[in-house]
Image (cartoon, rainbow, N blue to C red):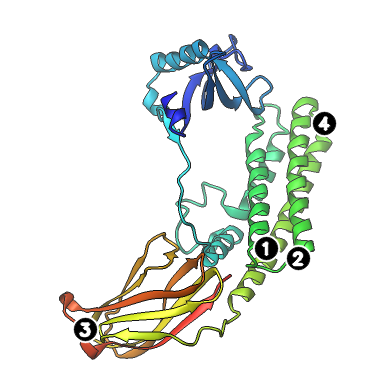
Amino acid sequence: MDCINNNNYVCIFLNQYYISSSHHYKKKYKKHPLLIIGYNNIEGNFIVADNMSTGKYKIVTVKYDELELAYQSVIEVSNYSEYEGVRLLSLKKANYVLDLNRITNQLNHYLYPAQNIHGDIINTKRYAVGIDIYDYLTDYVKAISNPRIRIDIRPFHVLKEHKKMMQMRIEYLTEKKCMDVHEGRATALENVLRNTEILINIILKYKVTRESALIERAVDLLSTIKAVEIHTLRDYIENVNSKKTEKNTDFNNFKITGTTTDKIIICDIPTPGCYNFFAEVDRGPDYGIFSFYSKSGFFINNEHLKQYDLYSDTTSSSKLHLATIQFDITGDKEFKFELIGKNNKSAGDRVTIHSLYIEKVY
């Protein structure tokens, strides 16, 4: 109760054999995670979310004594640590700046999982990744025609939730003018989500009737969903990339004061939004760290300071992407550049900033 009062949800493993709302009540010992989201001291029960009598994930009430008994049962008959113990979940407030590059990179990895250069997935031969999930689900749907194969509806629910989040993401980016309004794209995403819901119903119906025609229908529907999603996401990536390349020419004047190694840059931000900052720096063989400090906005990692290692074996001119910063208000904004040489010695005039650029992202 103290955890709930402190704005936490509580996730614990219980034995559903003792939960009267569960399908397994007094029938079968079933360890399963349950989410406690509230309580009612007057009625003496917790408000929880779990897969209960109908098998659907829903919110129900559980008496205090039932929950305690179900909790104690798991502890007594097993090593509770293997079920991750008790977990507290809470909302963490943060200043988040939308990173379009990260989003488009993730979607490219989703569409082309075999080309994921960041190595996010350990073993793509063992796991279905990105768009390849459709091929895996198609094989699974064909396999459940064998009555000895257990039908698990959960992957299809996960698929539906993923499409719902994808639709919400596109709507948000359109609202933020990161991409153009396009009714065809919105309709396509609605159809994808609706088809995943139809797919769930087909699998559930097959589980009851075992009609072979339903297997064929599910396979065809998976193929349709995959094709529409690939086309829609490619269109999205192309549209966002075209918006990112639009240059903003309203930011040519900077007021620069200070020494060679410690410069204050003041620029006027006319409208709230997200901006990319760039600088051209004369690179040389004998300088070190380039720091960019913002007093007025947050970088995408929710910090105020970024540093770059400028060591180089050859002298050249380089355009550096300093930061992506979110501004909620307009007006003059102050930034600070610090140039630090090797071993923290002053870089002196060995480093020269000769150009600054700002591009508005959205």
Kindly identify which numbered label has been placed on residue 174.
1
Which residue has dot 2 on it? 182
Q: Amino acid at mark 1?
A: Thr
Q: Amino acid at mark 4?
A: Glu
Callout 2 secondary element: loop
Label 2 neighbourhood size at 10 Å, few (<14), some (14-19), many (20+)? few
| Spatial separation of the CA atoms under disc 3 and disc 4 | 76 Å
Which residue has dot 3 on it? 347
1 and 4 marks in contact (CB < 8 Å): no
1 and 2 marks in contact (CB < 8 Å): yes
Label 4 neighbourhood size at 10 Å, few (<14), some (14-19), many (20+)? few
Question: Which residue lies at the image location 66% right of the left edge and 52% below the top edge?
Answer: 168
**Of the image marks 3 and 1, the number of the one nearer the N terminus:** 1
Dividing the picture into quadrants, the one containing residue 138 is: top right
| Spatial separation of the CA atoms under disc 4 and disc 2 | 39 Å
Question: Which residue lies at the image location 52% right of the left edge and 12% below the top edge?
Answer: 66
Near-viewer residue (39 or 58) = 39
Dividing the picture into quadrants, the one containing residue 81 is: top left
Near-viewer residue (226 or 8) = 8
